[in-house]
Image: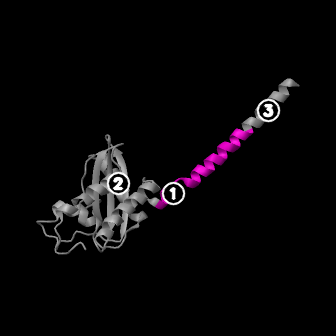
Amino acid sequence: MKLSINFMKFYHIAVIIIIVAIVSYINAKATMPDRKAIGSTLTAQEVEQLLQLHNKARAEVGVGPLSWSKQLAVYAQEWAVHLALTKCRLEHRPDTGEWRQEHGENLFMGTAGYYGVADAVGAWVSEKKYYKGGTLTSGNWHASGHYTQVVWKDTMHLGCAKIACKGNIIVVCNYDPPGNFLGQKPY
């Protein structure tokens, strides 16, 4: 009799633990970012940071905000994975071939655990000091090209990705329509 009472207590406690675990799992799934909606391995918080920082820089020069593009994020993730699996260094997509560039692109690499997506945008926006205004030429776009892509007036959509590689993270952001056309002003 004593054994069956102890077993029943154990059974009830076990059932309660299982129910709590199931409810916790369901709640955790409900608050996790929907990777399918994002398009890459970024978290919802990282997507928000990327959009906020890009749009802050754009607002400073009177350019409208960007919206998130799942398709661009998928495109960025594919290139990030390619970089990690091949050379593990920054390299823009080529102009031709299987990996041909179809969108504007900014790249960043930093020590994993120390740098994140906000640092990537910060690095690109820091090039503002090199942009002196006016149309882009072969002589002035190189030093500020990441910044001018961030604020390019005709760009409407942003999609980014990140990947770890040899102790670093690589951040890839793609922009559509692309910017940085020589002979044009970014804003």
Instruction: List x then y, in percent, for residue 114.
Output: 34, 43
Alpha-carbon span between mark 1 and mark 2: 20 Å
Q: Amino acid at mark 2?
A: Ala
Mark toward the viewer: 3 or 1: 3
Instruction: List x then y, in percent, for residue 107.
Output: 28, 55
In this rendering, the answer to whether 80 lies above or below 101 is above
Q: Quadrant of the N terminus?
A: top right
Q: Amino acid at mark 3?
A: Lys
The disc placed on residue 34 is: 1
Q: Amino acid at mark 1?
A: Asp
Residue at image location 34% in from the left, 63% down from the top: 54
Mark toward the viewer: 3 or 2: 2
Q: Which residue is mark 2?
A: 118
Q: Does label 3 or label 1 sit earlier along the sequence?
A: 3
Pointer 1 and pointer 2: residues touching (CB < 8 Å)?
no
- Report the residue that reaches farthest toward the top: 2
Instruction: List x then y, in percent, for residue 170.
Output: 32, 50
Q: Nearer the viewer, residue 39 or 116?
A: 116
Asked if residue 21 lies in the magenta stretch, the reply is yes
Q: What colour scheme does the image use?
A: one colour
Alpha-carbon span between mark 3 and mark 2: 52 Å
Tell me, yes or no, if residue 58 can be seen here.
Answer: yes
Q: Which residue is mark 3?
A: 9
Q: Does label 3 or label 2 sit earlier along the sequence?
A: 3
Instruction: List x then y, in percent, for residue 121.
Output: 31, 57
Residue at image location 12% in from the left, 67% down from the top: 138
**Number of marks drawn:** 3
Mark toward the viewer: 1 or 2: 2
As helix, strand or loop, the secondary structure at mark 3 comes to helix
**For this view, does 6 lie left or right of residue 36?**
right
